[in-house]
Image (spheres, rainbow, N blue to C red):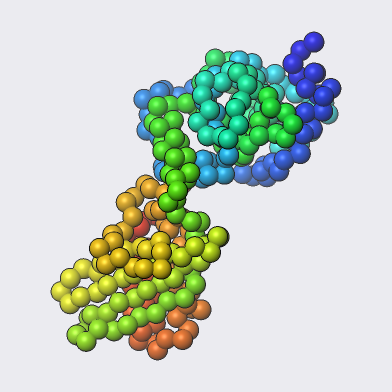
Amino acid sequence: MSFVPKIIQLGSLAAILSFAIPAPAQRRPVPANAPLMVPAPPYAAVADLVLRSPVIIDATIRSAERLKGPESIGAPAGYARLFVQADVHALIRGTESVPARIGYILDVLPDSRGKIVKMTKKRVLLYARAVPRLANQIQLTGPDSQRDWTPALDALSRQIASEALAADAPPIVTGVGNAFHVPGSLPGEGETQVFLTTRDGRPVSLSILRRPGEEPHWAVALSEIVDEAAAPPARDTLLWYRLACALPAQLPATAIEKMTAGDGEAAAQDYAVVLRSLGVCNRG
């Protein structure tokens, strides 16, 4: 008996597909074989993959069998649905052990001739979640959650997973709460503080200080106390990602509604300094 019919008999295919599947418009073709010595995707793109995926596996594909009939229901128009088996090399992220061989569902876009790119023996990184009560099955967390393995992508995925699990990992920023601006005694002098909202309620604030004849200096605080020696977060770190990929493009009107017009304008300009310093959240 082949592996796929056994899976279907046990009902595990239905269990896998019971998870939310991204809309067809979001799906991308599975990438073709790629050279190993290539740079990793942008930090933000990899962070998106890692942070939504409680399980990350380094594996080599052993087989990929095309599903047909009722088993393929749910695949986007034009896509083929495969049942893939892969041999595990390493568990990069996860709280439970995984067996030496795992299976998962993958939707791929055939080429112009209707052929599917050969995947056997391809080494991949799988960004996934566990399937309850099926230890040998995983569910990919998105249409781009099978990626060709490269040393750079492996290293960056491990780095981000480690950052996310650290005791001092920054909270998830959900928006801007309120802000205030205090003018200084000299023209061009002043300080703005912007308080951010977070998913778990932990404090995060931005402090922007201006002095005459100097470039504005800003810092981020992850506690109620603002350290005057603090600096902006280094680019391509989890704290940078939490800010650059979550902050709105402009300081919300609700954050400055209680200020005078002059103070509100100064606060908005200081907030813009932060955004320029952070740069674009490039997801590739």
Query: Residue 142 falls in which quadrant of the image?
Result: top right
Q: Position of residue 110 (x, y in %)?
A: 63, 26
Q: Is 120 above or below relative to 277?
A: above
Q: Is 103 above or below relative to 144?
A: above
Q: Position of residue 261 (x, y in %)?
A: 39, 87
Front one among 248 and 55? 55
Residue at point 36% right, 84% down? Answer: 263
Front one among 211 and 276? 211
Q: Can the viewer see residue 242 in this picture? A: yes
Q: Can the viewer see residue 31 in this picture? A: no
Front one among 94 and 240? 94
Query: Residue 249 falls in which quadrant of the image?
Result: bottom left
Q: Is 230 above or below relative to 179?
A: above
Q: Is 192 above or below relative to 246?
A: below
Q: Going by the picture, which residue comes out furthest to the top? A: 1
Residue at point 80% right, 18% down? Answer: 5
> In this image, 206 relative to 147: left or right?
left
> In this image, 111 relative to 164: left or right?
right
Residue at point 24% right, 74% down? Answer: 210
> In this image, 70 relative to 270: left or right?
right
Q: How many marks?
A: 0
